[in-house]
Image (cartoon, rainbow, N blue to C red):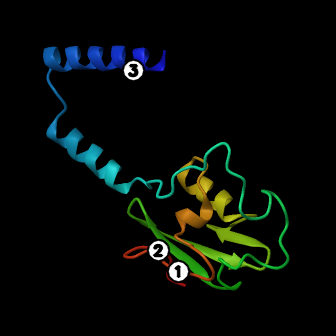
Amino acid sequence: MGNKTWLVKRIIWRMQALAEGDLSERARRRAAELANDADLRLIPPRSAHAKPAGPVSGAKLDGPDPRLPVPGQTLRRLYKGRVLHVRILPKGFEFEGAVYQSLSAVAKAITGSHTNGFLFFHLLGKGVRCAPGAGPVC
């Protein structure tokens, strides 16, 4: 049913584009700019039958997460033309004067939608490792 709805919308859009004219060059450039700025999924979702390799979601680990830098350091991330600064606290994260319990909460405040905080800030594996060409500077 979803494909039919999408197809009908696509046909109607194409008919309107033929009658009224296609997208302006400015609109095309803006769409390309938004597409380039989008965070893409780099890891495919796990299958429904796969069992989690690590601890169960929500389980508390002893000590701080090894992917995080030490408290007092600042994560920097370029996002939509803005340089964002998030300070690591002993129990939380400070962004623009507000304190958040998780990096995902900070990422949600920034993007407006649920985003994995470690992926958003390019924190991979043990300690701070930046993705090539982008990521935090601590």
Give the label on residue 15, or none.
none
Q: Nearer the viewer, residue 60 or 108?
A: 60
Q: What's the amino acid at mark 3?
A: Trp
* Circles 1 and 3: CB atoms closer than 8 Å: no
Q: What's the amino acid at mark 2?
A: Gly
Label 3 packing within 10 angstroms: few (<14), some (14-19), many (20+): few
Q: Position of residue 55 (x, y in %)?
A: 79, 63
Query: The residue tagged with tag 3: helix, strand or loop?
Result: helix
Residue marked by disc 2? 135
Q: What's the amino acid at mark 1?
A: Arg
- 3D distance between C-alphas at marks 2 and 1: 8 Å
Q: Is residue 84 above or below residue 63?
A: above
Give the label on residue 6, or none.
3
Q: Nearer the viewer, residue 29 or 116?
A: 116
Query: The residue tagged with tag 2: helix, strand or loop?
Result: loop
Label 1 packing within 10 angstroms: few (<14), some (14-19), many (20+): some
| Nearer the camera: disc 2 or disc 1 | 1
| Nearer the camera: disc 3 or disc 2 | 3
Q: Nearer the viewer, residue 49 or 83?
A: 49
